Amino acid sequence: MEKLSNKKGKLNRRDFLTTTAAIGVATVVPRSVLGKGYIPPSDKITMINVGCGYQGFNDLGALLQCPQIEILGVADPNTHSNDYLGWGPNDLRDMQRRYTGDQTWLEGVTGQPGGRNIMKQVIEIYYKKNREGWNGEIKAHEDYRELLATMRDVDAVKIVSPDHHHSFQAVDCFKRGKHIIMQKPLGNKLHEAMKVVDMATANPKIATYIMAWGSSSNNGINQTKAWIDAGAIGKLREIHNWSGRPYWVQYADIPTERVPLPRGFNWDLWLGPAQYREFSPKYTHCNFRGWFEFGAGSIADMGIYSMMPVFKALGLGSATAVSSRFARQYTIDVDQVPRVVDNTWSYPLAGSFRFEIPYKNEKIFFNWHDGGMKAYVPYGYPEDDLPLEGMMFVGEKGAIVGGFNGQNPKLIGLTATAAEMKKYNSITAPAMPNTREEVAPGTPRWLQGWIDDVKGVSTTKNPGSFGFCRELTESYNLGAVSMMRNGKKLQYDSATRRVTNDEEANRLLHRDTRKGWEFV
């Protein structure tokens, strides 16, 4: 066998990790020497975390507890502030206290603390307390690219930045040969997001994972599919999914007030590929989701969780058409005349999409509703109204109604005989596969699947891989353009990635990026 070496004549840690996986070499060291749960440094996946806000901290626990992963650095344009959004008073601070084990952490601080310096300290405290012999330092920088330029042997990048950065950062990671874990969505402009899918397809040895899969895969979708395949509701005609989101503010007007830039916050870097505009706190933190330029709305925030398993289980294609409807807002002109706000910059308070989706050589409708809008109550539903959040599959002979992720599905309104109902109720389906059954200590099942891909020991890609999100990603980004075109029905050709009936809509499928942020 040819001797393994790098340019300096030595085998570095990253070369060892990938090469031993490829050729099946294993280093055997007695457990008595290593200690319980010990992972040799050569076997660890090194990572930097991009994004140190609420979601970044919410995801951090799984990475900290996993002995197969070591975080080397964190990046965020914000140094530190206490103005993040949480689900309750002191939510972020209490989360950080759980990680550090320090119940006096940030005592007296009001608000929700976050930023790269806070995350750096939290990781260092956790590692010193929980990883024997760890005495390192977590690097922190406003720009993750600077970390990658100065740090050797970084295997992977965890992306938890605002939506408008996702595609650019993912494509950059592909070009650098870095494995990727990313929060949803893959991008908030169709052409950018599909570039990520294309890069994932072209680079199969780079392991990818979209976080929505680990939370959304459940037995309910497989049970629903089993009923549909058995003909319980007849031919499938429509799918409805509805959410109580948005829970952030979706502003109807572009901010005009001048607000001082917070100390330690790089606004220009936060804008990234977006065209320059003056700073406003109405854009940042969780509020970015409500702007067409920065976010992808409630459907990308929550619909990827619920719909990714549906698209995968039923084999749904990319939307061939979409229309939208939404709550309109009015303003009063200076001459005291009401006028509709022609809003092309932010998502509405409530809205819905109606997608035409290929399914088994036919066409069905997939309908998304948010902001309190829900599907109609189907015939035979035992309650007066549907829950705040849910999912429904409508066929020719009845419907299936479940929770938001399709959990706990029920057959309703069926025109079936007693014998047929007995047959349908006897049908059970296995849980949707997520990753292998054997999971290493301290490692959640979803993360183990990605780790297996990184180390090259999987026979198939983990189901959260970017490529499995192609059709859903293409569809929701097309929906956003329909809203920007005042709800117009758009006809779409996925082969050419073009809208065939509206040239202005084609322009909106991509972003006019600032100089230095172009895809290369």
Image (cartoon, grey):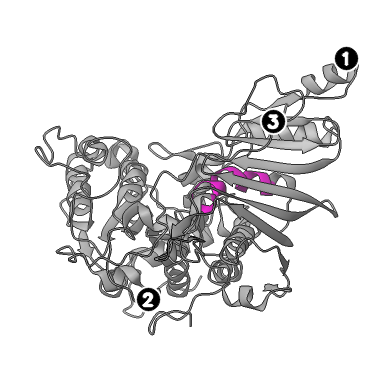
Lateral position of residue 151 relative to residue 506, left or right = left
Residue occupying the far left of the picture:
108
Task: Describe the element under mark 2 as helix, strand or loop.
Answer: loop
Residue identifier under label 1: 418
Residue 309: within the magenta?
yes
**In the image, what residue occupies the spot 29% across and 75% down?**
149
Residue 387 occupies which quadrant of the picture?
Answer: top right
Q: Where is residue 335 in the image (x, y as percent from the top left)?
A: 42, 65
Foreground label between 2 and 1: 1
Q: Position of residue 3 (x, y in %)?
A: 44, 73
Q: Residue at x 49, y 62 (%)?
A: 341
Label 2 Cα crowd, 10 Å radius (few <14 / some 14-19 / many 20+) = few
Secondary structure under badge 3? loop
Q: Nearer the viewer, residue 334 or 123?
A: 334
Which residue does the numbered mark 2 point to in the structure image? 6
Residue hosting label 3: 377
Q: So how many labels did they put on this image?
A: 3
The answer to whether 273 appears left or right of 308 in the picture is: left
The 10 Å Cα crowd at callout 3, few under 14, some 14 to 19, many 20 or more, is few
- 379, 67: nearer the viewer: 379
The structure residue drawn at horizontal position 60% and vertical position 63%, both measured from the top left corner, is: 486
Q: Which callout, 3 or 2, points at the residue further toward the start of the chain? A: 2
Residue 414 in view (yes/no):
yes
Vertical position of residue 502 compared to residue 288: above or below:
below
Give the Cα distance between marks 2 and 1. 71 Å
Q: Can residue 44 be seen in this view?
A: no
Tag 1: amino acid: Ala
Snapshot quadrant of residue 71:
bottom left
Residue plotted at (85% across, 36% down): 396
Q: Give the range drawn in magenta.
A: 299-312
Q: What element carries label 1?
A: helix
Q: Distance between the residues labelled 3 and 1?
A: 24 Å
